[in-house]
């Protein structure tokens, strides 16, 4: 898979609080068992991103919490220019 990816500076200031309200959902592009991926637009910069989000209560009700943490661990181990570094 190649490990020579150039690392770009962060898109967001790490000291800036960013939350769901800073984005407008434009359209869904994917859906899994415990989350959706949508194209979103940051309200102040108008830049578009893909955002995965999930309903915490549904994850708990469906006993999917373990799967969420498993995905988090997998994502932390990946290094790819098209994926967010966690």
Image (tube, rainbow, N blue to C red):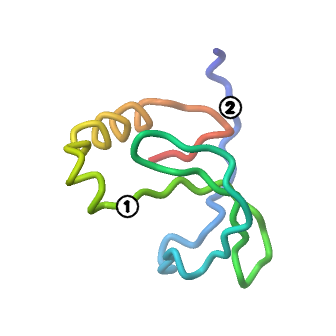
Q: Position of residue 82 (x, y in %)?
A: 68, 39
- Identity of the residue drawn at 66% across and 63% down: 11
Give the mark nearest the N terminus, 1 or 2.
Answer: 2
Q: Which residue is mark 2?
A: 5
Residue 37, compared with residue 33, is above or below; it is: below
Farthest residue, direction top: 1
Q: Which of the image's four quarters has the N terminus?
A: top right
Residue in front for this viewpoint, 40 or 46: 40
Q: Which residue is mark 1?
A: 55
Asked whether, in this view, residue 50 is left or right of residue 59, the answer is: right
Farthest residue, direction right: 46
**Crowdedness of circle 1 by 10 Å Cα count: few (<14), some, many (20+)?**
few
Q: Position of residue 23 (x, y in %)?
A: 63, 75
Residue 3, compared with residue 5, is above or below; it is: above
Residue 21, compared with residue 1, is above or below; it is: below
**Crowdedness of circle 2 by 10 Å Cα count: few (<14), some, many (20+)?**
few
Q: Nearer the viewer, mark 1 or mark 2?
A: 1
- Identity of the residue drawn at 37% across and 36% down: 71
Give me the disc on residue 6.
Answer: none
């Amino acid at each position: 898979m190649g490990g020579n990816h150039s690392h770009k500076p962060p898109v967001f200031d790490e000291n800036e609080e960013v939350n769901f309200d800073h984005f407008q959902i434009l359209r869904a592009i994917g859906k899994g068992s415990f989350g959706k991926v949508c194209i979103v637009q940051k309200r102040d910069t108008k830049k578009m991103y893909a955002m995965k989000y999930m309903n915490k209560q549904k994850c708990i009700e469906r006993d999917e919490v373990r799967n969420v943490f498993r995905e988090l661990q997998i994502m932390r181990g990946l290094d790819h220019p098209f994926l967010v570094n966690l």
